[in-house]
Amino acid sequence: MPELPEVETIKTVIAPQIQGLKISEIILKRPDIIAYPAAEKFCEIASNRTVTAVSRRGKFLIISLENDSRIILHLRMTGCLLLTPSDFPEEKHTHIILRFENGSELRFSDARRFGRFWALEKDEQDTYTGIEKLGIEPFDKRLTAEYLKKYLKKRKKAVKACLLDQSIIAGIGNIYSDEILFTSGILPSRRANSLNENDFERLAAVIPERLTYFIEKNKITSEEYLKTKGQEYRNTPFLQVYGHSGEPCPVCGSTLVRTVIGGRSSVYCPHCQKV
């Protein structure tokens, strides 16, 4: 699933290419990907509108349109967003195409069809997407040891599960929670209420540092992004533990171990991440 660094990469690549362009036509092949409003109304809100900005909130992308209407989308597990020329070969499982006046097309494909789109009109309250329930961004200055203590200190859940809780911090997923906890030296299965002051201080520092690091490693040109069809991210060689179960720890050489926490796979070093 694309997590914050990947969604940030998509925003960075696509935003400058579509800002200022007018949507001339919407080709909707699977109306069920429109979560709100009805498909016909969605097209009415977004058609013949000029894109004024593209932003990210957690793992959501927000395409702002003139007259303060907006398209919101979530890629979920396998969603992919590509800006292509009109004659570019169409990806399998392409469900919606936003065609711009200059002939380019913003295409959304999704093999598992979990991705969703919403359209909201000017001044319409967002009670549909779940964005209003998100916690702070990882780069927010409010992300301090005290903030983490406030939300974690009384919780008996594993700290890994707490990092995945989007109502506390928005955008962290399975991959980067492993990376954050490894760098912090904290065992993923450790109860959040067992963390001490030093643990909270480290987490508050490591969370934005690691995500910034992977955003930088993910940097890609628009040409490269299109060539790889939006599927190649550059952080993979830099992941220290995620996906490396059974391999030597990059710090101490101990064998990395895979476990399951709250139904999610997690990899850690039993030596560097002791209780």
Image (cartoon, helix red, strand yellow):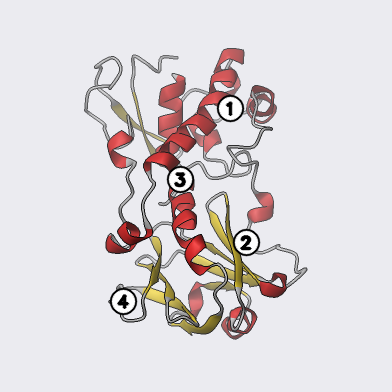
Query: Residue lying furthest left in this view?
Result: 247
- How far apart marks 4 and 3 lie (CA) works out to 26 Å
Per the image, label 3 sits on a secondary structure element best described as helix
- How far apart marks 2 and 4 lie (CA) works out to 28 Å
- Which numbered disc, 2 or 4, marks the residue that appears first in the sequence? 4
Which residue type carries mark 1? Lys
Instruction: Specify the label residue 5 is tagged with.
Output: 3
Which residue type carries mark 4? Glu
Which residue type carries mark 2? Thr
Residue at image x 49%, y 50%? Answer: 8
**Mark whose residue sits in front, 1 or 3:** 3
Instruction: Specify the label residue 90 is tagged with.
Output: 4
Q: Quick one: 62 or 151, which is closer to the camera?
A: 62
- Which numbered disc, 1 or 4, marks the residue that appears first in the sequence? 4
Q: What residue did someone put label 1 on? A: 156
Horizontal arrangement in the rendering, residue 149 relative to residue 15 (left or right):
right
Horizontal arrangement in the rendering, residue 249 relative to residue 41 (left or right):
left
- Which numbered disc, 4 or 3, marks the residue that appears first in the sequence? 3
Residue at image x 36%, y 76%? Answer: 85
Q: What residue did someone put label 2 on? A: 129
